[in-house]
Amino acid sequence: MNRKHLIQFLLLGVLFLLQSCDPQIMDDRRILVKGNIVDSENNPVANIAVRCQTYGLVLGEARSDANGQFQFTSLDAESYNGLNIMVNMKSNDYYYEDGHSYDLTENLAYSAKQYFDNFTNRPAKTYNLGQIKLNDAAQLTVFFNNIPGDNNNVPYKMEYDSAICQIDLNVPNSEDCNYEEYNYYQQLDINTANFQTNIKSQLGSTVIFKYILNNEPEQTISIPLTNTENTYVFEY
Amino acid sequence: MFLNIKLFLVALTITSLTLAQETETPTETTAETRDTKDGGKNIGSIVIGPYIPFAFGDNFVNEGMDLKMGARIAFKVNAYKGIYIGPYFSFFNADVTNKNLLGNYDNTTNTVIGAIAGYETHISKFDLSIGIGVGAATYHNDGYYDNFSDTATAVWLNPEVGYRITPYLGLYFAPELRHDFMNIDAPAELGNTFEGVNYLNLSFGLRINLGTAYKYL
């Protein structure tokens, strides 16, 4: 094979790979999505967006009515593409949807839910999500203050309920809101300047703040989110 | 003996004259007379023209799409004593107006490729036919990011009236009662929304007659 043919072959191969990575809509297929959205006090919540997506491709969408109810027909993705039903989340143009970022929440007053079905041979069916409870959103601002004169080394990390909970549609009671912001410790030392960090979570949940002071055993602080705006000061 | 010979010769003469009379017919005929005896050859016809779809009933097309005009072409080949068969093609476009019911896509192009068969007769300058057709229907659907297809088997009843302006050129009008048996897999709760679509479509346009028979109809 001469160089010219080799280059053409490689270009075709690259084009083929790019094409095959795009999500594909299934031919001759429709699914039905329905449910009822309430807040933490079981009051119906209107105008919440519900979208059926696969890798950023919106297959169907609707908004809850005055009674919190919604129902819509959606297209379906090819079986090798997972299916996501996003409640109160922005339409995501990016393929990567496994995000807990609060920025993905559309109505900032409430939390969000992401249902997913990664079953490869799923039939055409109705996804009856039943009653979907969206808790009120809450924010925690943590101030990290470095006390002059102390030469402390403080690794830390935080665990809390994300603003976005994930549910596997094929596993009963699989709702998972737990989010560990970092799976490793962040470092605070004598050179760290004062800073603050904002955490978006759910009203009524608890933020677990873990730290290790100068190689001592790990300490845990529970910070309940009792208001929509909460603050905590950590001095070291 | 001589009387018999004379009678024989007279009889022979009379017979000869009679036979000569019978053979004295014109050897040259006009082309029209010759063709009238044959009737000409009817090959068939081609019809082509706009195609205006109208959906009706409880189905996703009628409840969720705005149908646009398309086109239709059919070739009717005269098979035997007025019975015809032939290929058929039609298409039309549509915009999705109810994404909540149909799913998130914007428009579709419907095509049908199939065959027709029927019977045609000719009265004065009119060509009247009734036929049935069957074909593969495809809804080529387009969305913002991607496209996909819905398929169906289409069957239709197709009466047609043609009017000959000249022996080989005329106009036609053909209403079409059509049903698409959809292959869409959908949950039972959606009922018969995606099971089938009913159409009453109208087509009219140009008819091209093929064969010499149309000169004498």
Image (spheres, coloured by chain):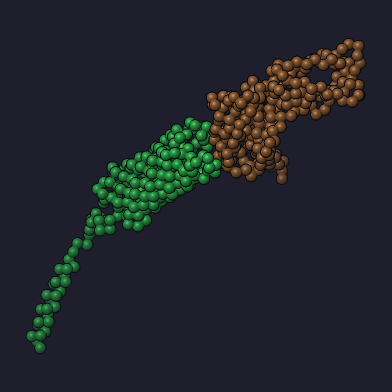
Lateral position of residue B205 relative to residue A210, left or right? left
Q: Quadrant of the N terminus of chain A?
A: top right
**Picture mark count:** 0
Lateral position of residue A170 relative to residue B40, left or right? right
Which is more toward the observer, B14 or B191? B191
Residue farthest to the bottom, as pictured: B1
Give the residue displayed 36% in from the left and 52% down from the top: B118
Give the residue displayed 82% in from the left and 27% down from the top: A184
**Looking at the image, is B25 positioned above or below residue A173?**
below
Task: Determine the image quadrant of residue A164.
Answer: top right
Which chain gets the green colouring?
B
Task: Determine the image quadrant of residue A220.
Answer: top right
Give the residue displayed 45% in from the left and 46% down from the top: B154
Residue farthest to the top, as pictured: A148
**Looking at the image, is B81 positioned above or below residue B114?**
below
Which chain gets the brown colouring?
A
Q: Quadrant of the C terminus of chain A?
A: top right
Q: Position of residue A166 (x, y in %)?
A: 69, 32
Lateral position of residue A107 relative to residue B53, left or right? right
**Whether residue B11 can be seen here:** yes
Q: Position of residue B148 (x, y in %)?
A: 56, 39
Which is more toward the observer, A47 or B118? A47
Lateral position of residue A165 relative to residue B26, left or right? right
Task: Determine the image quadrant of residue B208.
Answer: top left
Q: Position of residue A32 (x, y in %)?
A: 56, 37
Which is more toward the observer, A236 or B37? A236
**Looking at the image, is B196 positioned above or below residue B30?**
above
**Whether residue A105 can be seen here:** no
Q: Position of residue A217 (x, y in %)?
A: 89, 25
